[in-house]
Image (spheres, rainbow, N blue to C red):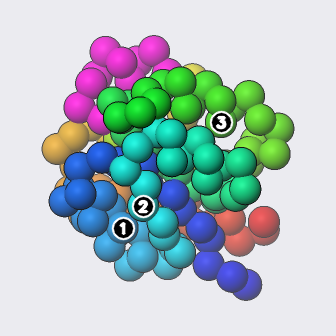
Amino acid sequence: MASPYALVVEDDPQVAGLFRIALQDAGYQTEVLDNGHKAQVSLMFTAPDLILLDLHLPALDGGVLLRQIRSQSRLAHTRVMLVTGDEAGAQRFAGQVDSTLYKPVGYDQVHQVARQLMPLFASS
């Protein structure tokens, strides 16, 4: 079985690097994109198993991107982990995400949630 594919959409390079390492250590193939528009384009051609999504992104807001993800039937099985420092913003999307982590987020938190989600992708 191939490793699940995770897409990290995060504009802070240090945070994105930490997420990448945590996901790779949990067994995911991982790609990092630093703005919402790049993610929007990528999602035209890919269907990640997991997306780590920041709400406040350059070029296209994470909330807009989330609504687009949830409106596409081919992405219906994609799990979305919202990772943000904006608790009020996160509350607006609570029913549309599979989990929410509030910044500052550490390696252990991302790694643990990623490992918990891993069995969901075994049957994909």
Task: Say which mark, if any, is on residue 20.
Answer: 1
Residue type at mark 1 is Arg
**Which percent across, then down, holds residue 52?**
45, 49
| Label located before the other in sequence (1 or 2) | 1
Kindly state the secondary structure of the residue where label 3 is placed. helix
The quadrant in which the C terminus is found is bottom right
Sequence order check, earlier mark of 1 and 3: 1
Against 26, is 46 above or below? above
How crowded is the residue under tag 3: few (<14 C-alpha within 10 Å), some, or many (20+)? Answer: many
**Residue 81 visible in rendering:** no
Q: Badges 1 and 2: C-beta atoms under 8 Å apart?
A: yes
- Return the residue nearer the eye: 62 or 109: 62
Q: Residue at x 41, y 68 (%)?
A: 23
Query: Is 122 within the magenta?
Result: no
Give neighbour class at mark 1: few <14, some 14-19, many 20+ (Cα, 10 Å). many
Distance, label 1 to label 2, CA atoms, is 7 Å
* Residue under numbered circle 2: 32
Q: Is residue 115 above or below residue 72?
A: below
Q: Position of residue 42 (x, y in %)?
A: 61, 53
Magenta-colored span = 84-94
Residue underneath mark 3: 69
Residue 58 sits in which quadrant? top left
From what the image shows, is residue 66 above or below residue 75? above
Write the residue at 53% across / 75% down.
Answer: 29
Determine the main secondary structure of the stretch shown in magenta. helix
